[in-house]
Image: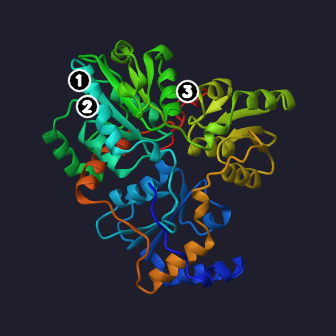
Amino acid sequence: MKVWQQPLPSIYNKLSDPELRVRIQLAKEALGDRVVILGHHYQQDAVIEFADFAGDSFELSRNAADQKKAQYVVFCGVHFMAESADILTPEHVRVILPDLGAGCSMADMANIDQTLECWAQLEELCPDQIIVPITYMNSSAAIKAFVGEHGGAVCTGSNCRNVLEWAMNQDAGTRGRGDAEKEQEVIPSFSSLPASPRPRVPASPRKVLFFPDQHLGRNTAHALGYPLDRMVVWDPKEDLGGNDPQKLREADFVLWKGHCSVHQLFRPEHVDQVRAKYPDMKVMVHPECRFEVVQKADLAGSTAYIVKQVEAAPPGSQWAIGTEVHLVNRLAQQHPEQKIIVLSDCQCLCTTMYRIDLPHLCWVLEELAEERVVNEIKVDPHTRKWATVALGRMLAIKGTGNPIGKRQPVGNTVD
């Protein structure tokens, strides 16, 4: 989603970093517990310094849902994250995105018109199958609402495996509008779904429409035992997504043709190069990486999973990590007793996340301190209602953080 960001007042670009830090701290103190700042792991260190909570999209969704007393949530992330925060927080909480230009290229790869067209074609082609839509957290509120209204759920890298297991059992995709209405009414407690779904033999054929990241869908489905030839990629620019009708009918997973511009940069040869240079080094990657990279890696998991693995590792551990460079560098600084490098020396930077900086953070906080709300993210009531259903299902399904199943420590959960 491309949104116009008004120019910052010129003073904020003239202030030095020390001056900005002082003014941010003063504004935070003036606002007190009326404001909560959420910071995504991919943020710059200078921004994370002021975050009340830092985490991946799953963790921050839960942090947002827990804000009952705050008046403002300042979300230092990207647009879809702020939308989700607005959906999950009570009506009186106002969500602020410091720079409206902080979007997500992956989320922009699936829009609601394309989704409706895809859904209509799949229903016409597969009338005897139950189609369950599952969207990754990195999607617009409109896509999340579509999923909620059609019996599906949102997933993250932390709980994707369990969400897909849920999607392929007898519960998902079978609710009528009345059932979803009732579910939506109790979503704030997230108590309407089993916390740990167990796969069951489906009563009728079903398939998952997974979007917008084809790689997370492919990697997770393959880890669940589904062969690659039972998956097809849906290109929204082509009729039937560019697929043969029979192959589409036979597929268990229809994967939207989308990807993360950061994790797409990691290639199989990068793993080979690390193995040649550092034979004792473990390779750990995010499941948004392409299939060939994940297969070569030692471990694969969500951002929170990656952080927890490093935190739990003994001194002397060596890691080559395939994810956004700010997080990798921060982990290296926090754990000097370990050797931690980025899997590739390419510029693996989330450029849209980088738009959130000290000048923008200072500006929005000082405006709030003067009772002026800028850059508010507000989701319309209909979208909010159905996106709440989809996000509520997401939050009710615990995650291991390790959707690929590589060397997952027993009992380790990231939720």
Identity, as a three-letter code, of the amino acid under mark 1: Glu
How far separated are the C-alphas under marks 1 and 3? 35 Å
Could you tell me residue 322's position as x and y percent?
68, 39
Could you tell me residue 102's position as x and y percent?
52, 60
Residue 274 in sight here: yes
Q: Residue at x 36, y 14 (%)?
A: 250
Label 2 sits on residue = 120
Which numbered dot is residue 405? 3
Which numbered dot is residue 124? 1
Classify mark 3: residues with Cα within 10 Å, few (<14), some (14-19) or many (20+).
Answer: some
Name the quadrant containing residue 150: top left
200 shown above or below 41: above
Assess whether mark 3 and mark 1 are in contact (beta carbons under 8 angstroms): no
Residue, far bottom:
370
Name the quadrant containing residue 155: top left
Residue, far left:
178
Identity, as a three-letter code, of the amino acid under mark 3: Gly
129 shown above or below 341: above
Tally of marks: 3
Q: Residue at x 71, y 80 (%)?
A: 16
Q: Pick whichever of labels 1 and 3 is earlier in the sequence.
A: 1
Left or right of residue 50: residue 396: left
In this view, the residue in front, 238 or 414, is 238
Assess whether mark 2 and mark 1 are in contact (beta carbons under 8 angstroms): yes
Residue 391 in sight here: no
